Amino acid sequence: MRPVLIVHESTHGHTTKIAEKIAEHIRAAKLGAHVDHSGEANGLSLGAFAAVVLGGSIHGGSHVQPKLIEFVKDHRAILDVVPTAFFVVCVAAARPGVQAREEVARYFESFERDTGWKPKHVAAFGDELHYTEYGPLEKLAVRVRASLRPASMDGVPTDTSRDHDLTDWNSVAAFARVVAADAVEASAGRPSQLPPAIIV
């Protein structure tokens, strides 16, 4: 059975951790899984995979890493014919409320606009806050933002003495199961019966 390819870009390493966890769940479903950064995956034949997953983290407010966008543009032909999924990693995914959901939706819309590509399944996962790596000014900025714009920090830990993992790992597992089901159908030569999934 053909494996699943997981292509991602990570700025601080948490997206890589999520990509590896997705691969772990897919392997538990008795499928192969290959994890690469977009530059490394450029040399691969995407047609050899049963499904392709792409993932990136949000930085600068609205865009994933440019390398991931270029990867999609370079491989549109195959991405349009194999089962695909896309996930973003951002703090907004861990926040409750309509405002946070709308923010996440804008990330997906921005990625589709930048690439011209629409994946079948999408998911958003909470990021990890690396407060212990922040300098004094960055930590002060967190406290000021929490006091002046409390709504934007709703559900976001502001204890800067330690790091905080905001990822819902059960959602990561659910996303991986959807991808694995699509990959099994594709390897059997049948179109997937799964409807598009949005996991936030």
Image (cartoon, rainbow, N blue to C red):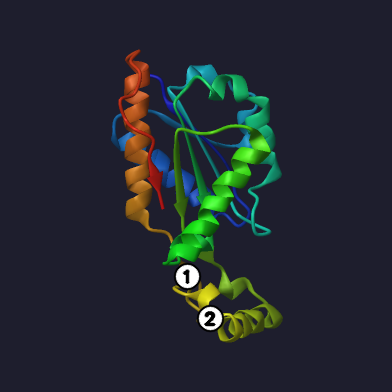
Residue extending farthest to the top is: 189
**SS state under label 2:** helix
Q: In this view, does 91 lie above or below 89?
A: below
Instruction: Determine whether the residue tagged by mark 1 lies in a helix, strand or loop.
Output: strand
What label does residue 150 carry, if any?
Answer: 2
Of 148 and 157, nearer the camera is 148
**Residue type indicated by callout 1:** His
Label 2: few (<14), some (14–19) or many (≥20) C-alpha neighbours in 10 Å: few
110 sits to left or right of 88: right
Residue 174, how many percent across, how many down? 32, 45
Picture coordinates of residue 129 (x, y %)?
A: 54, 68
Q: Which of 17 and 146 is in front in this view?
A: 146
Q: Decide: is 146 above or below 109.
A: below
Identify residue type, mark 2.
Pro
Q: Can residue 176 be seen in this view?
A: yes
Q: Residue 105 carries which label?
A: none
Q: In this view, does 3 lie above or below 130?
A: above
Residue sitting at x 63%, y 32%? 116
The residue depicted at 63 percent of the width and 80 percent of the height is 139
**Residue at 65% across, 57% down:** 59
The residue carrying mark 1 is 164
- Quick check: 183 left or right of 162? left
State the quadrant of the N terminus. top left
| Residue under the image location 60 percent in, 50 percent down | 10
Residue 192 lies in what quarter of the image?
top left
Residue 16 percent coordinates (x, y): 53, 48
Callout in the foreground (2, 1)? 2
How far apart are labels 2 and 1 at the CA level?
18 Å
Badge count: 2
User: In this orientation, does residue 31 appear?
Assistant: no
For this view, does 178 lie left or right of residue 44? left
Earlier-in-chain disc, 2 versus 1: 2
